[in-house]
Every structure is written in C-alpha cells, then in structure tokens.
Amino acid sequence: MTLDSPVFVDPSWVEKHSDVTLVDVRERREYRDVGHVPAAVNVPFDSVRDPSSVATGMLPGREAFETLLGDVGISNGETLVAYDGGDGVYAARFLLTAAVYGHGGNLYLVDGGFDALRDRLGVTADPVDPEPAEYDADEPDAQLLADRDDVEAAVDAETTQVVDTRTAAEYDHSHVPTATQLSWERFVDDDGRLRPTDEIESILDEQGLSPETAIVLYCNTARRLSHTFAVLTELGYEDVSFYEGSLTDWVRAESPDWDPERLYERVRAVAADGFEALPHELGEDIFGRLHLIGLYTQKQDGYFMLRTKVPNGVLTAEQARTYGEIVDEFARAPGEYGGTEQNPEFGDGFLDVTTRQGLQAHWVRVEDMPEIWDRYEEVGLTTIQASGNTLRNVVACPASGLGEEVTDVRSLGEDIADAFEGNQRYANLPRKLKVSLSGCHENCGRSEIQDLGFTPAIKDGRDGFHVKLGGGLSDGPRAATDLDIFVEPEQVEPLTLAVADLFIEHGSYIDTAVNRLKFIVEEYGIDGFREELERYVDFDFEDAGKDLTTSYRGDHVGVHETEDGYYVGLNLPTGRMRGEELVELADLAERYGSGELRLTANQNVVIAGVRENALDDLLAEPLLERYSPDPGPFTRGIVTCTGAEFCKYGVVETKSRGIEWARMLDSWLAETDRVDESDLPDAVRVHMSGCSASCAQPQIGDVAMRGEAKRTPEGTKDAADVGLGGDLGRGTFADWIAGSVVLDDVPDGITRLVSAYAADGGTEAFSGWTERVPDADLRQLIRGEARADAVVQDGDRAASEVN
C-alpha cells in the first residue's frame, strides 16, 4: 500500500501500539552511542538511497531495499513506525521508499521524532539483534514516481502543479519552470512538530493547492519532498507523485552539449565566419562552453585567451618551439589596442606560464583556431578540457625522472589526463577537479591545495602513494585531508576516476557557492567520504603505510646536479615571456639538454638533462640574463594572475606591476644597509591576484594580495587586501592583515616588513615570524605607521612606535 492518512502519530499513540515495528533512521553512530527507543531497529537514512547517485537521492534498487529491511528482521506486511532525530524529513524519506516498493503494512511517522519518543518511552543502549527476515518488495509504484517526461508534461498542464519544496533562496537561484515554491519547513513549528491542520490548510490554500490538485513534488535530493508528501497525504491529497531525479536531474538534462570533441569540431566548422558567428550558430551560451576547449573571452571584445594543457608541465622542444611560433604569429594585439606597444614590458606576442604548469596566450581570434589546432595536433598539444568544469591540468613535480625520487610520476599523470580527455561524462563535473602527483620527497605537487593529491609512500616494501582530498583556496581555504590509505601506482588512475564519479553523483550542479569537492569532504567527514569512495573502486582500500614526504620545495630555480648531468631552473618573473623567446629556449634545450622543458607551478621553466660539459655554455647564453637561474629573492618569488590587463574580473593590473616591483625590491635589497640578502630566504614569495579570487594562489605566499579599487579624496586608486604568512611547508595559509592598501604604497610596506624580520634575526621562517608578531604591529608596518626597528626591540615584541 502507499502512505495513507493518518501518517503522523504522537508518542502516546506509539505507547498504545506495542505490536508495531519501530524503525530508527538516524545514523548508526547516534543509534549506538546516544541510544534508541527500546526495541527499535536501525535503518540509517543514508542507506535508503542508491549509493551510486547520492546527490540526486535516487531510490535504492529493489534487491538492495529487500536486503536492507530483511537484515533487521522486517517483513512485508508489518506496521512500521519511523522516527529520526529532527523534523521528520529522513523518517519520511524511509517511509516513502517503503511505499514505492509496495510495503503491505501501515506506515507511520512519529511527530517530534527521537526527542519526543525518548521523553515518553525512555532510551536504551542495549543492542537489538532481530532475526533476519525474508522481505519481498514489489516493483516500484509508477503512480508515485514522476520521470522527466512527467515533469515536462506537468509544466505545460493546467491541472497539475509542480511544487518546489526547497527554500525560497534556493528556488530563486534555480527552479523548474512554472513550479510553486513551498518549503517543507513551513509545515513545522519551532520545535519541529507538525503545525495544526488549519494552519497547514491555510498555507496550501495560499498556494492554490487543494486535495483535488494533481501535484508533482521535487527538491534536490528527494528528502525534503518526502516530508511534504507525508503532510499532503495526512490532509487527504491523493494525486501526489515525486520527481525522483529532482532539480539536479532537470538542470543536467537542460544543460547544453558538453561533449568536448563535438564542441571542438563545431567551433572549427564556423570559425572562418568570425566571432559573431559563434553565438549565432552555436547558441547564446557558447562562450561559457568554450572554456572546455581552452577559449576564454577576454576583456577586449572579439578576442580570446587561449589556454593550452600541458600534463605534468612537460614540453618537448618541438612542442615548445611550435607553441612559441604560434604565439609570435597569432597572439598579437590590433593597432587600436596598442599593437606592438600594447604591453610596456613585453610589447606583443607573449605567453604566460600558469600556476598549474599550463600555458596561456592572449589576443587570439577564433578565425585562426583551425590552423592553431592543426599545428597543435602535429606535435601532440591540445586545448581539449584545458579548462571548464572538468579535470584541470595535472600538476606534477617538475623534476620527475631527473633527480632523487620514489616514483617517476610522469606516466601516471599522462594516464590520468588521457582517461579524462574527450570523455563526455567527465567534461561536465559540478566544478573543476584539480589533481597533483608528487613522486619525490618534497611535496612539489602541493597536495594540500588540490582536490586530490598523491604523495609518495611505502608499505610492506611496495612503493606507492598516500592520498589527500578536499584542498582548495578561494574565500575559504582548506588544506586537503589525508584519506589514510595506501594505493599502488596502478591504482592511481582508477582512484582518480572514482573521485570524479563520486563528485558527479554527490556534487551540486545547482549551488555554485558550495560545489567544489572540499564541501563534500566537509559534509561527510573524511571517514564517511572514504567509506563512500570505496564503493566506486574495484579494489579494497589499504590503510596508510609510511609517508615519504620529508619537506616542501617551493621552486626549482637554479642549477641542480643529477646522476648524469644537471637540470637548470630559470626564473620567469610572473611567468611571462615572448613567444620568440620560448622558441629560443627550445633551441637551447636541444643544444645543451635532453630536448625537454618543464613548466613549474611557480610560473618558471626547467631545462632538463643538461650535459656536464654543456653547463657553462648554457649559463653564458644571453637569454639567461633575462631569465636567470640565480635571480634576486623578490624576482624569484613573484607570482601573479592575468590581472586587469585581460581578465574581465581583474580589478588591478598585475603582470607588469609585479615585474616592476620585483626589480625595484631587489635593487633596494642590493643597496640598503638595513638588510643583508643572507638574512632572507632564496625567494620572498609575493603572490598577487588582481581580484578577490585565488588564481595567483595568494594564500600560500609570504606576502599575499587581492586586488580591489579604493575610493580616496584624490579619486579611485588601485589597492589590495594584504595578507602575510602563507607557507605550505609549515601548513599555514596567509592571514589577511591590512585591507584596502593603495598599491603604490605596498612595495615600501614590504621593505619595512623584511627589515623588521631581518632585525629580529631572520633565522625563523617568515611565516613563523609573522605568526609571532602581533597583527597590529604587522599592519602598521604595511601601512607605514611604524618603523621596522620599532616593532622588534632586543628580540622581543614591543608596542609599535608611530613615526
């Protein structure tokens, strides 16, 4: 039978009916540790779902439901009384599922849940060990279930009403067309008890709903709608069904074609007709979808930023040369935007190395993309899934295969990239997925800030990896959590795909504010996430082995000796260089090295496999005067995003400003008698984002900046929030110390900071020093309200002295 009125019962009713089966749907831990109503069996609400589609709350399979109930001694025909620990949503979900599968007995929900029953019937921690039963379920009741076709018909029908049971805010963000918003919470009072019948009827009447109305309910995960279903049944509504797929299914079905290879071919087909042909031929939403093939509209109308994927950051000389030539030929500004003089530092025809070891170029026209793609294909480059809500460029140690390491991860990174590339399932994740691999001892992949990071480990003599999950920056930075498992190299790719599968099913396609993987890890907890993830792989998880990460390496700049020669890391301040310079660098890689370049997450480049007898000649090359293996600490540490020069979200310019600052600060360091360079680390990491986003990873910089505009009496000025103390080696993110600092004043603020640091000995990590010194003192140093020598006196913290 289905649910039937009455549905809601109070504890006194339960006390009088000792022949019923009480079902506690709280989590197993609560049932066991907090206790339960005597004789109640436990069917955790989280188990009443299809484990492969958690986010959409799909029903468990028929056999799974039979097993679920049979294992706790329930047979079809028993009267079931369900309760949860809250307002009845989860108990209602269990009962509605039982109704769908044709449970033969009556179904009731306890109004007030566990708290109300505990007051009346008491609580026990004694285990309930029922004799397993044979539970026979029917096929799902089609009258209760609405599929997408039913919802589409309801949208157009005058006699059927679609009802959205979520909050008003969620409804305003996205909803099924013509749906009425009616939050389930309106039916309960502040104590979680059902409101009086006349109040509920008044609420329904306001929405134009009556027992004669045919109603289709939906929410996000088919839980909240279950409570509304129970309420409507209580009031005698008989023609009620629910959209099992809920809004998630609707949104995904309504989303555009996310087949990256088909999109690639369609853009090629219309490219010759120019920029305006894209929305005309491919739809008004095309510009968002173009991210999937590496194309972003830039601030200047009619032009694109082109992002190119470089798995592991590894480029052959042939690839680098081809890319440099393409940039030199096609990444050029028109005259009205300054032409060859449009950038004061680089002129025209330049490229950017990204913080994910990829490449970007600007001023690209869609008319030129077919030729660019043809030339890419000849050398094995691609833009497919270079961006968008898919796997982003796989980050790996730039020295993989070159130095001391546990595992050379290059082939693993390539396998992961290949598994995702062109795969339509993985081309439309809820949000981007960032993965890194470290095979060395120095955490070069920065696993803490990745959605999924692999670091080297050993167990029982086997080399493999430990796994971290749920890292990320943005407004709420979160360090990835150790999953506490050991995986062998051949399990890395399937585990990555499993994480993507879980992300698809658990992640939100609706709420963009909380749709990164880290929110799922937070929601389920690492133990719950691990348990859920194991369902998606065909191997059993092993507990962690011995971690082989010993330190954190910030960059690979410099000359580094290997068993058979050297690799040489060159500093590209802010990651920018001219296309013709990359061509020259490719030539140097062939002439002096193995013919391979490595891009780094610090926006630098490594020449691999340099022969011992060629090292001096390489170091004497004129190009290395501009891109030095031995730069000053500020030039070495500057990292920036694209900034306002091209980015639509950028508030302040970053690239040219960053280079100018770095040179100015290094010059100051060489001339000042207040600080000796030996007092500072090899790199003073200044990370500058042009807006409030985290594209330059400011949270991990010694000095962090987020650009903004500041109104002053002299007019609007470029400014930034300034943070201090980000350090992955110490596991700290930058603290935001001073808001709205005018950018012209920041370099002087940095000199005061490093002077105070050096005066205090300069022996501890800069992040440790900023953690120790009071924020008020640091803030006054940044703003010029205190002298460096006034902040630290005799090695002790002191009140700042205002000039």
Image: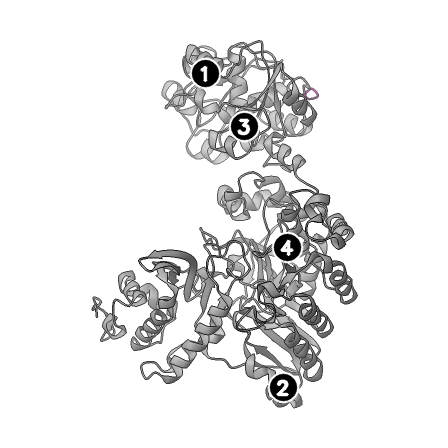
Q: Disc 3 residue type?
A: Arg
Reading the image, the residue beneath label 4 is 302
How far apart in space, not on screen, are marks 1 and 3 (Cα)?
20 Å
Main secondary structure along the magenta-highlighted residues: loop
Residue count near mark 4 (Cα–Cα under 10 Å), binned few <14, some 14–19, many ≥20: some
- The residue nearer to you, when weighing 100 against 754, is 754
Q: Is residue 138 magenta?
A: yes
CA neighbours of label 2 inside 10 A, class few (<14), some (14 to 19), many (20+): many
Give the distance between the C-alpha atoms of the residues marked 3 and 2, in whole angstroms.
65 Å
Give the number of the disc on residue 330. Answer: none
Instruction: Tell me which amino acid carries mark 4.
Output: Gly
Q: Nearer the viewer, mark 3 or mark 2?
A: 2
Quadrant of the rendered image containing residue 94: top right
Q: Earlier in the sequence, mark 2 or mark 1?
A: 1
Quarter of the image for residue 221 reads: top right
Q: Which residue is mark 3?
A: 223
Which tag, 3 or 2, sits closer to the chain's start? Answer: 3
User: Three-letter amino acid code at disc 2?
Assistant: Leu
Q: Quadrant of residue 138?
A: top right
Task: Estimate the spatial distance between the alpha carbons at disc 4 and disc 1, rounded to whole Å.
Answer: 52 Å
Residue beneath disc 1: 203
Q: Are marks 4 and 2 in contact (CB under 8 Å)?
A: no
Disc 3: CA contacts within 10 A as few (<14), some (14-19) or many (>=20): many
Which of discs 4 and 3 lies nearer the camera? The answer is: 4
**For residue 364, above or below residue 112:** below
The CA distance from mark 4 to mark 3 is 46 Å
* Magenta-drawn segment: 136-140
Residue 45 coordinates in the image, percent (x, y): 54, 30
Q: Which dot, 4 or 2, sits closer to the camera?
A: 4
Residue 507 in sight: yes
The tag earlier along the polypeptide, 1 or 3, is 1
